[in-house]
Amino acid sequence: MKAINAATKSWEAYVRTQSPELREQLLMEYLPMVRRMATRFLGTLPRSVRLDDLVSAGVMGLLASIDNFDPTLGIKFETYAMTRIKGAMVDSLRELDWVPRSIRQKARKLEHAVDHITRRTGRSPEDAELAEHLGLNIEQYRELLDEVNVAVLLSLDDTLKGQDGSESYLADSTADTSTNGYDEQVEEQETRDLLVDGLRDLPEQERLVVALYYYEELTLKEIGEILGLTESRVSQIHSKALLVLRARVRARLAK
């Protein structure tokens, strides 16, 4: 209780004074949260992505959150800041534009295959179906999932962007948005409904990986230990789940 009261007083003082010293104090207090988020996110990315780069981008999101947060609205700062920190990290990846065109093309080809089979069967495609549709054996198909991981992540993010540029993430589907404006609440509720419906349609293993990663905030390695799978295999399942969710969301937004 004392810690909560101290945090509340710090926010009240900063909002009142806009003191650079208090801003720095709040930054240092929440910096470990940025590093934890960056470490988890790094587990889904290629080895060429550096942890320090993600942390630096996340710090910018944290600073923006500190500057715009209103503690009188009754929402926890962590809840408010997480989306903005993750958004800053994703934007930094997009700005680097280091995903080769060939990888983007492969991702689009895989997305089309997911969409085609989903429309034809009315359910999420199985790995063997996707591999056959693409003319690959199962190992080649799984290697493809590894290759397109980041492109899939960024493409899902683009799909979930609001027309006003606002962003939504899978973890936001359980967030409390009661403090947002009415129009924003409606838009975010629609996004959450799309995501929840899409998650419900996923096969059990894919749904479990998504739930453990986005809601329980486990790393891919930790999920692998729980499921008895390698970290690489969990990453592949995660990529496929995002592909299916993107196809579902796009189809429903197009209606």
Image (spheres, rainbow, N blue to C red):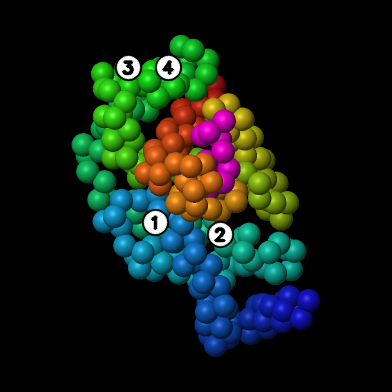
Look at 31% across and 62% down and name the residue there: 50
Instruction: State the SS at label 2.
Output: helix
Which label lies toward us, 1 or 2? 1
Neighbor class of circle 2 (other Cα within 10 Å; few <14, some 14-19, many 20+) is many
Inter-mark Cα distance, 3 to 4:
9 Å
Q: Is residue 90 magenta?
A: no
Q: Which label belongs to residue 42?
A: 1
Amino acid at circle 3: His
The nearer-to-camera label among 3 and 2 is 3
The residues colored magenta run 204-213
Q: Earlier in the sequence, mark 1 or mark 3?
A: 1
- Among the two numbered marks 1 and 2 on one chain, the one whose residue lies closer to the N terminus: 1
Q: Amino acid at mark 2?
A: Met
Disc 3 marks which residue?
A: 133
Q: Which mark is residue 84?
A: none
Chain-order first, disc 4 or disc 1: 1
Q: Where residue 75 sits: x, y (%)?
A: 71, 62
Q: Determine which residue is flagged by label 2.
A: 82
User: How many numbered circles does the render carry?
Assistant: 4
Residues at circles 1 and 2 in contact by the CB criterion of under 8 Å = no
Disc with the residue nearer the chain's start (2 vs 4): 2
Neighbours of disc 4 within 10 Å: few (<14), some (14-19), many (20+): some
Rounded to the nearest angstrom, the CA distance separating label 2 from label 4 is 34 Å
Residue under the point 57% across and 62% down: 81
Secondary structure at numbered mark 1:
helix
The one of 53 and 216 positioned closer to us in this rendering: 216
Tell me whether circle 3 and circle 4 mark residues in contact (CB < 8 Å): yes
Residues at marks 3 and 2 touching, judged by CB atoms closer than 8 Å: no
Give the quadrant of the N terminus: bottom right
